[in-house]
Amino acid sequence: MAASLDLTLAVPICNSLAIIFTLIVGKALGEDIGGKRAVAGMVLTVIGISLCITSSVSKTQGQQSTL
């Protein structure tokens, strides 16, 4: 699946997940991640990634069914 992933979808997902993983690892190491605003940002980022993936999957399935 990764080989057929659209580049316009892959790049924002990788960039967003890099920020989230950095915050998670920072918290695991005992750093202050910014409180509720940082958590809210991570939640919104995950929601945005989910919307992008859902949109891409539904678009891909629609194209396959017309073949």
Image (cartoon, rainbow, N blue to C red):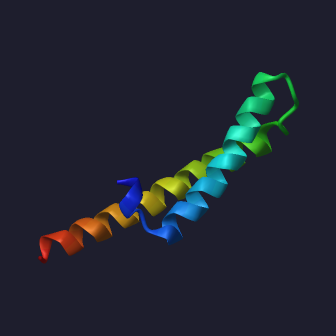
For the image, the number of numbered tags is 0
Q: Residue at x 62, y 48 (%)?
A: 17
Residue 66 against residue 5 in the figure, above or below: below
Where residue 31 sits: x, y (%)?
A: 87, 28
For the N terminus, the quadrant is: bottom left
Q: Residue at x 68, y 43 (%)?
A: 20
Q: Is residue 36 left or right of residue 21?
A: right
Where residue 29 sits: x, y (%)?
A: 81, 23
Q: Residue furthest bottom?
A: 66
Identify which residue, 62 or 36, lies in the foreground. Answer: 62
Residue 15 against residue 27 in the figure, above or below: below
Identify which residue, 16 or 48, lies in the foreground. Answer: 16
Q: In the figure, residue 53 lies in which quadrant? A: bottom left
Q: Residue at x 53, y 55 (%)?
A: 49
Q: Is residue 38 left or right of residue 4?
A: right
Q: In the figure, residue 57 lies in which quadrant? A: bottom left
Q: Residue at x 41, y 54 (%)?
A: 2
For the C terminus, the quadrant is: bottom left
Q: Residue furthest front?
A: 3
Identify which residue, 7 or 66, lies in the foreground. Answer: 7
Q: Is residue 56 left or right of residue 65?
A: right
Residue 43 against residue 61 in the figure, above or below: above
Residue 66 against residue 3 in the figure, above or below: below
Identify which residue, 42 or 62, lies in the foreground. Answer: 62
Where residue 55 sits: x, y (%)?
A: 39, 65
Q: Is residue 7 left or right of residue 1?
A: right
Where residue 18 sits: x, y (%)?
A: 68, 48
